[in-house]
């Protein structure tokens, strides 16, 4: 009997220790570390990290919460919005995000209870066709339609790990509640384990942040998805590619004999032989580096650039073009390309807290001076041509086909549209005001289906969501095509152009 009691105590102690370890290290501890992942490098960790940050900070001013997907991130800038609101209303507002890429209405609905601890005074929810995932019907059932498809099939598809890994990483309990009855016992056990144990739930995402922290301090920072170094006046691409010239202020670790800095040189840049990189400052001090090998190349700056310390400009003797490249370097655009800078280029210390901060990139400047016809030609070339060579554009092609097919169908409020209505009802009952926006869409893709009976009924459905503290605004034509990088996402300039329009509508609600 004593032995049995001892075993029971031992087992209980082990279980308790595991739970304490799990809670301390994985559910709490990992969010106390600095986050050095930009928005598009570690989506779900960034989302959870941001949520924990906001939930643990005192609320000191009226709070506006931006809800949704990448549409929300690319449409709003927290600093721009708060500054414009201060200018227009004379009041200070805090702007926060509850958004991640692909956060469609179903997923938003499953996370609604997360809103209360954040205590928002207004929720702004921009949506677009891409958020509704109606294209999945045609992918799963090539001969099917959104009039006849089984909605249950779409819901189960949307909550599979393959289509929505966040179902396991972010809201496993809610997923079990919503579609658990259709899961196998093995799958149910997996989601239950994810809900109960943080070390299992976060195993695929917390390691990314730990790896970033390690690489930023001890690595070369040459393997990454988004540039997070100093701004480059001539422009820098999202992946860190320069143009022919790039200017920066030297830091001491860049000096010859120290760490230097790393640049990636492609075979396409060296296609006609070695290329020179001429570095010069305003006093005429200069250095020339001959690039004659591909891959990541280490460059050390001459000590002459440090007395006095002034910005330098590095200029390549040649450039290359991604539309003439192949493999992973192939891309359909006409930008002149230089070299790729390491992720933390020009920084003494890595940037932190950048998970919802957007910075302008060279891709944002492509269309500023384009006329409509030139932009339209570029639009089709850049986004929809060469599927056989660029499988990554498959979802854009699927969206194009879906919009053109659905224009021939009758409108039926299924799937995410039903959850959108549930969201509106939830806000109506909660007393928290929400502004649902039919967000601007690129006029080119909007023309594919805007005049259809389906779109007219879709718009009427969105308008019917308005009631009490649920507000709806249709902004689909508020931005010219040059303000879009694709069908739905804004360029940085497009975001700036939309800012005062959003502020006008938000200000109207607060004045009621």
Image: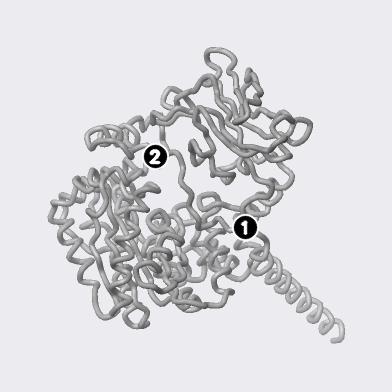
Quarter holding residue 473: bottom left
Classed neighbour count for the residue bearing mark 2: other residues with Cα under 10 Å, few (<14), some (14–19), many (≥20): some
Q: Residue at x 78, y 81 (%)?
A: 8
Q: Secondary structure at mark 1?
A: loop
Q: Judge by depth and name the residue closer to the eye, 235 or 115.
A: 235
From the viewer's perspective, tell me whether residue 25 is left or right of residue 7.
left
- Residue appearing at x 59%, y 26% in the figure: 265
The residue identified by callout 1 is 35
| Residue under the image location 24 percent in, 54 percent down | 478
Q: Is residue 120 left or right of residue 3?
A: left
Question: Viewer-nearest of labels 2 and 1?
Answer: 2
Q: Quadrant of residue 353?
A: bottom right
Where on the picture, by quarter, is residue 204?
Answer: bottom right
Q: Nearer the viewer, residue 160 or 417?
A: 417
The Cα–Cα distance between marks 2 and 1, rounded to whole angstroms, is 29 Å
Residue with the mark numbered 2: 365
Using residue 117 as the reference point, say whether residue 302 is left or right of it: right
The single residue placed furthest to the right in the displayed view is 2
Specify the quadrant that holds the C terminus. bottom left
Q: Answer yes or no: is residue 196 visible.
A: yes
Task: First in sequence, mark 2 or 1: give its number.
Answer: 1
């Amino acid at each position: 009997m004593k032995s049995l009691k001892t075993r029971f105590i031992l087992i209980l102690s082990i279980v308790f220790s595991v739970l304490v370890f799990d809670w301390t290290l994985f559910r709490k501890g990992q969010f106390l570390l600095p986050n050095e992942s930009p928005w598009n490098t570690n989506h779900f960790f960034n989302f959870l990290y941001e949520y924990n940050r906001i939930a643990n900070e005192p609320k000191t001013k009226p709070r506006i919460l931006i809800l949704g997907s990448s549409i929300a991130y690319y449409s709003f800038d927290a600093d721009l919005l708060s500054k414009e609101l201060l200018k227009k209303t004379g009041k200070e507002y805090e702007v926060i995000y509850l958004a991640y890429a692909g956060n469609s209405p179903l997923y938003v609905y499953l996370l609604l209870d997360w809103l209360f601890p954040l205590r928002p005074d207004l929720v702004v929810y921009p949506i677009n066709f891409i958020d509704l995932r109606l294209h999945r019907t045609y992918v799963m059932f090539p001969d099917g339609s959104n009039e006849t498809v089984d909605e249950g099939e779409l819901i189960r598809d949307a909550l599979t790990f393959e289509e929505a890994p966040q179902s396991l990483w972010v809201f496993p309990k809610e997923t079990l509640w919503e579609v658990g009855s259709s899961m196998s016992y093995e799958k149910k056990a997996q989601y239950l384990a994810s809900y109960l144990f943080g070390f299992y739930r976060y195993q695929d995402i917390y390691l990314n942040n730990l790896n970033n922290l390690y690489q930023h301090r001890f690595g070369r920072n040459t393997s990454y998805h988004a540039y997070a170094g100093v701004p480059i006046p001539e422009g820098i691409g999202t992946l860190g590619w320069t143009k022919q010239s790039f200017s920066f202020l030297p830091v001491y670790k860049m000096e010859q004999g120290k760490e230097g800095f790393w640049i990636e040189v492609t075979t396409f840049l060296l296609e006609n032989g070695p290329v020179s990189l001429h570095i010069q400052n305003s006093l005429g001090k200069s250095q020339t580096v001959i690039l004659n090998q591909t891959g990541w190349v280490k460059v050390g700056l001459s000590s002459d650039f440090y007395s006095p310390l002034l910005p330098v400009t590095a200029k390549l003797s040649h450039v290359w073009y991604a539309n003439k490249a192949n493999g992973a370097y192939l891309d359909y655009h006409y930008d002149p390309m230089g070299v790729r800078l390491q992720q933390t280029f020009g920084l003494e210390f890595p940037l932190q807290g950048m998970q919802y901060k957007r910075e302008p990139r060279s891709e944002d400047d492509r269309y500023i001076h384009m006329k409509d016809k030139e932009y339209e030609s570029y639009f089709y070339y850049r986004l929809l041509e060469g599927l056989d060579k660029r499988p990554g554009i498959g979802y854009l092609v699927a969206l194009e086909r879906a919009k053109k097919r659905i224009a021939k169908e009758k409108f039926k409020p299924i799937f995410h549209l039903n959850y959108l209505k549930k969201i509106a009802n939830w806000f109506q009952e909660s007393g928290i005001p929400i502004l649902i926006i039919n967000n601007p869409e690129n006029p080119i893709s909007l023309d594919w289906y805007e005049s259809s009976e389906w779109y007219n009924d879709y718009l009427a459905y969105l308008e019917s969501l308005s009631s009490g503290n649920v507000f709806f605004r249709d902004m689909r034509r508020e931005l010219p095509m040059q303000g879009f990088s694709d069908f739905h996402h804004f360029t940085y300039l497009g975001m700036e152009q939309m800012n005062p329009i959003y502020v006008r509508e938000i200000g109207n609600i607060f004045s009621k």
